[in-house]
Image (cartoon, rainbow, N blue to C red):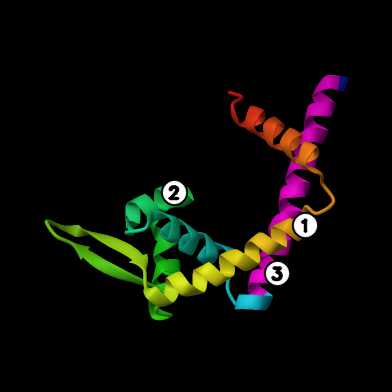
Amino acid sequence: MTARSKQKLRLWLQMLKATKHVENEVRANLRRDFATTLPRFDVLAILYKSGEGLKMSELSSQLMVSNGNVTGIVDRLVADRLIERVAIKGDRRATLVRLTDRGRQQFGHMAQEHEGWIATLFQDLDAREMDAASALLAQIRELS
């Protein structure tokens, strides 16, 4: 293994550790403050952004997981009256899922808190550091 390949491996490990650290903080805060999970938050976030809702297949695609993984989360969110399933006219096999008014209100509050948690986690980084990190991560995403 060359010094350069070891350096690349260290970078990869640091990225994983940083991501895991932030994710663990967010998971703990969601559990503590809202008695919810990150996957539930992610579903609500995507539906909030979508506006009118999404087909289950579109939701799965955006979450980058299988329909089966999403179904259980959606079932629980429906039971909690945060989202609803709506039949799609002309397509008996597809179902649209969208936020209820209650879900939109609750997610809005959760999103505000989430933004605060992230701000606190990154509070010691100045604008230049955050811009440099964002640019580097964007460059890494473009690698083949």
- Quarter of the picture holding the N terminus: top right
In the picture, the disc for residue 62 is 2
- Quarter of the picture holding the C terminus: top right
List the single residue furthest toward the front: 127
Name the side, left or right, on which 121 lies relative to 68: right
Q: Which residue is mark 3?
A: 28
Please identify, in this view, whether the residue under mark 2 or under mark 1 is nearer the observer.
1
Q: Which secondary structure lies at badge 2?
A: helix
Q: Amino acid at mark 2?
A: Gln
Q: Amino acid at mark 1?
A: Leu
Name the spot of residue 39 as percent of width and height, x first.
54, 62
Relative to 114, does residue 76 appear above or below in the rendering? below
Query: Residue at the location (60% across, 77% down)?
Result: 34
Relative to 5, does residue 33 appear above or below in the rendering? below
Give the camera-side residue of 55 and 49. Answer: 49
**Sequence order check: which comes first, mark 2 or mark 1?**
2
Relative to 53, does residue 83 appear above or below in the rendering? below
Residue 10 belongs to the span the image colors magenta: yes
**Sequence order check: which comes first, mark 1 or mark 3?**
3
Pointer 3 local density, CA inside 10 Å: few below 14, some 14–19, many at least 20: some
Residue 28 belongs to the span the image colors magenta: yes
- Label 2, label 1: how many angstroms apart (C-alpha)? 26 Å
Q: Which residue is mark 1?
A: 121
Question: How many numbered marks, from 0 up?
Answer: 3
Q: Amino acid at mark 3?
A: Ala
Name the side, left or right, on which 89 lies relative to 124: left
Residue interval drawn in magenta: 4-31
Disc 3 + disc 2, Cβ < 8 Å: no
Q: Which secondary structure lies at badge 3?
A: helix
- Whether residue 50 is visible here, answered yes or no, is yes
Disc 1 + disc 3, Cβ < 8 Å: no
Give the camera-side residue of 112 and 29. Answer: 112
